Image (cartoon, coloured by chain):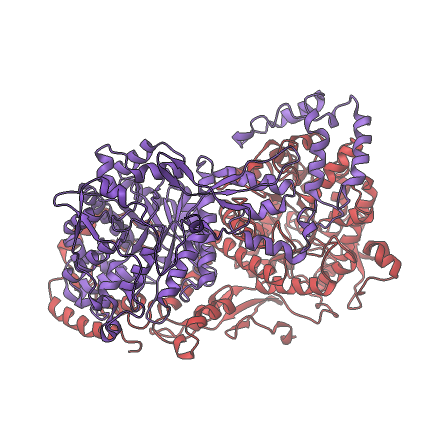
Chain colours: A purple, B red
Amino acid sequence: MADLYAQEIHPKHSYAPIRQDGLEVPETAIALDDSPTGPNEPFRIYRTRGPYAEPEVGLPDLRGQWIAGRADVEEIEGRRRNLLDDGSRAAKRGAASEEWRGTTRPVLRAKDGKRVTQMHYARRGEITEEMRFVALREHCEPEKVREAVASGRAIIPNNINHPESEPMIIGNAFLTKINANIGNSAVTSSIREEVDKLRWATRWGADTVMDLSTGNDIHTTREWILRNSPVPIGTVPIYQALEKVNGIAEDLTWEIFRDTVIEQAEQGVDYMTVHAGVRLPYVPLTSKRVTGIVSRGGSIMAGWCLAHHKESFLYENFDELCEIFAAYDVAFSLGDGLRPGSVADANDAAQFAELKTIGELCKRAWDYDVQVMIEGPGHVPLNMIQINNEKEEEWCGGAPFYTLGPLVTDIAPGYDHITSAIGAAHIAMGGTAMLCYVTPKEHLGLPNKDDVKTGVITYKVAAHAADVAKGHPGAREWDDAMSKARFEFRWHDQFALSLDPETAQSFHDETLPAEPAKTAHFCSMCGPKFCSMRISQDIRDEFGDKIDEALNDENRALIADLGIPTFNTDREETIEGEVSPAVAVEGEQEMAREFRELGSNVYLPER
Amino acid sequence: MADLYAQEIHPKHSYAPIRQDGLEVPETAIALDDSPTGPNEPFRIYRTRGPYAEPEVGLPDLRGQWIAGRADVEEIEGRRRNLLDDGSRAAKRGAASEEWRGTTRPVLRAKDGKRVTQMHYARRGEITEEMRFVALREHCEPEKVREAVASGRAIIPNNINHPESEPMIIGNAFLTKINANIGNSAVTSSIREEVDKLRWATRWGADTVMDLSTGNDIHTTREWILRNSPVPIGTVPIYQALEKVNGIAEDLTWEIFRDTVIEQAEQGVDYMTVHAGVRLPYVPLTSKRVTGIVSRGGSIMAGWCLAHHKESFLYENFDELCEIFAAYDVAFSLGDGLRPGSVADANDAAQFAELKTIGELCKRAWDYDVQVMIEGPGHVPLNMIQINNEKEEEWCGGAPFYTLGPLVTDIAPGYDHITSAIGAAHIAMGGTAMLCYVTPKEHLGLPNKDDVKTGVITYKVAAHAADVAKGHPGAREWDDAMSKARFEFRWHDQFALSLDPETAQSFHDETLPAEPAKTAHFCSMCGPKFCSMRISQDIRDEFGDKIDEALNDENRALIADLGIPTFNTDREETIEGEVSPAVAVEGEQEMAREFRELGSNVYLPER
């Protein structure tokens, strides 16, 4: 199975799992070159990629035994696929454009009266294999995971029919996660392309993937994706339900939606976006907006409510939905169907009326032990973001917040991965647990492979920036490893430690392609003659270890008089005790001479 | 002169200057298509590009008469260029690689005892043409500009020897500005390339440009740049001074530096970075840093201080420097030579010791009526940024803050335009007046033309996001114009209103290249069958104007009971009074029928 873990993103990367209590938890080890001061331990990072398999075959079953071991599920016949699940073309053709012929496993469902959700086990005080797996991934105690899941402050999206998935956790107390959206539309894309995007997205760091297909072969595309996905898969079932009624929102019924949810639950979808908070009375609140309703699911339900002048069938039947979710461990992603689609519409009554309703639905789901996350905006100016964190915490009982950006300005189509990463880092620092990526194509088209990669890397930046800001244990170590490599001119390590080694190295090589330049103590920014990093290193080499030998009271006093607080608590010692002999009277001429000799070497390419 | 304003970035853009009191202040007008509700006025945006000219000729003299009119300057012989100013190769060759043969104007300097700075005039209560020009650009009262410049809270960088420049203002109370760095290095680039980068950077929105050349032909490259630049040009004179001593920091002297400053002041450099805050006693405070001193200027001065064990000659001779700056109206950019080069080193004693000293120097410069801005970090975690705004305000008397990013994480080389834009938007919301861009090549190489464009657009995003967050007058109107165009499917307007029309349109056309797709009421994200924007628009068309006709007390009560505060103060009316007839009992069947008929059309590509 080793080859399942081949295809590393850099030669210095290797599959280095944590093996404990019979679990094998994937991690990546990054080999580092020696420092002048000695060798460096390999640097270990969280690994979202999971194993690879032939797309036609699918991934091995990781969780099957754990699930069976709990003896609360049974194999069922299931509804099976109806050809119309794949759309009219498939029905005419008598098959999907490319049928799934890889591994298929029996459909599982909870035995009568049983709830098979991680929240249910957690509340019973049980620590499942999934929780232990997650604890090893997050380097925390299993009990911390259990408590977070039991309280609803974190979720482990793990449908019992998606045994290929590697457990991961979404919650404010854990590493900030990112989601990548894929999926075809009426105008583009094939099944193979979507499986390729799935693998590509997880390769670069997507923690979950949503299949938002709205075109042909929806059922079969999802089957290919689930059987090949090591990460949780989310969907928006109303999209497929709409296809089943030929795109006429008013023709939707609870029965069609319910049937679609069961179809997807039996396939193994781990979380589903449900826009049950779009209530009839809220719809008019959007009519004076600059951009109205921009959520597809939200507008579908708004259209239905107005056509029938009835309350939403999702809201009316929410309890039955909870029973279904509890029988497969599908997690709710309570959708923000009325999220603002422009900064002009941010934080308005429609958005917050829905959020408050979502909070009530969240607690109803918890009554069924169903896991829940709460979707958030959207488009919000930077100064209006924090109140979203506060209201979500207040109204939704601390359930994980899952936001789309938010975009902090509307004027940069083509750069909305950036306009949204600014908001995403900000809202994640405020407690958002998962960030839904935005690609450069947002508002303009469907993302291609390059866009998916750019979106994922950009969101890894936002998520990590938030983890560093939150002081998440271990987060800043990564930055420090990179900075140490940078200071020591370990170019290969800098590439290997970066989120995108290929791009980092190709940018470096554009100006200095030769191999020696990757060990040289300079780069193209300053050229060989002068380098600030080099002079700093030489200063440290010369004086670093002699700092405490001599002290000049006059200079010490000058610094003390500044009364500079040391805002970086990691470096509390910096004000005192670091006055170097260079500023001392004793031996200063000697030092100056030594440094001058040194100085004349500083500017040579090699020393 | 009209052709000077040719080459718009989009066919819908045109040069549309504000003409008032004999001034012609460039602005761009963006023609908009009609809305369903009627025609739209052209949308006007701030224009940084200025006029174009043949690079060999240079730009026309805009400010010469204003300067002469103040009768406080005189023509001087000046030091003229010494061939060594262009480096040893030029000296051998007897000429720079490409001599400047375009317009050259007599060198101006203040008459004896005169100060010719905008701050000096402002403090005398005079409103100069430069201030009136700026007021028209910023759409504010000239007195607001004068007061800000007089108090030191804003600067107008306008060397009397750079009459080609269009006055602009840098201050927290005005639009957030961005700077683009260009310049050659020992290993790359030609004079023509740098002029090309200058025009490219201002084309996309750079408000000022810094020439950081460290290679050959420094003097002549700068001459080409100044004579072709409509925006203020900044430099770091210590770089050229270091070249004059063959890159040996310890060989630098005050006399060489002073001569270099005069050389550049006579050419017309508008602001100069001076690292006078890097004092001898602070240098050891960096010796335990992860990345030491990363500022080139900072490490040059640190190296000099240690080699000679003397206090910085910049600090010691600061008053004489102020006298020189006052004679040409060169503005100080007091450099943060000890800024952190990694998140590990953020906000440490070295950084803040220097900032406090810079604050003292700022006030000394103000005693000479010399304009000042304060440089800031660097690399700072998101949660540690705000204290930088606070200390800069406290210690530097509210002088404009000019920051490099800051980068909020170190792990993404190749994406540091993004890691830094996150920090830049955040620190600008906190009051930073100008943001120095970071390109994707940061830490890896010198930016090429594409990198310059990406850096500029990314920073326009960060600056605008901050202006929106600060509620800067008119800032959000741009977002609203874009969102209205988006909601109305005015694709050409969306392209024209975006910061980068080319990229926006090319992304759209990747999936839907045909011209009809640019007027179609759908896009490739959902395809023609269903579109949320379309359904929202139809909802509004159908019910928007009938909102107040009927009211359903039950639903009104339900919404009121939610007690949703309207966080977006622009939309205070949204909670009350917008319950549409669709949710009323009266005539509901009729409405439902109408909507159903409408609904059956909603999903057609065209209506």
Percent x, y for residue B516?
39, 79
Image side of residue A284 versus residue B396, left or right: left
Image side of residue B271 versus residue B523, left or right: right
| Tally of numbered discs | 0
Specify the quadrant of the image occupied by residue A184. bottom left
Q: Along the line of sight, which residue is nearer the eye, A388 or B579?
A: A388
From the image, which quarter does the C terminus of chain B lie in?
Answer: bottom left
* Residue B437 drawn above or below residue B165: above
* Residue B1 drawn above or below residue A371: below
| Residue A323 in view in this figure | yes
Q: Residue at x 58, y 33 (%)?
A: B348
Q: Residue furthest front?
A: A1
Image side of residue B404 versus residue A442, left or right: right
| Residue B233 in view in this figure | no
Specify the quadrant of the image occupied by residue A539. top right
Percent x, y for residue B438?
58, 52
Percent x, y for residue A384?
39, 48
From the image, which quarter does the N terminus of chain B lie in?
Answer: bottom right
* Residue B503 drawn above or below residue B462: below
* Residue A15 drawn above or below residue B136: above
Image side of residue A79 versus residue A41, left or right: left
Percent x, y for residue B60?
71, 68
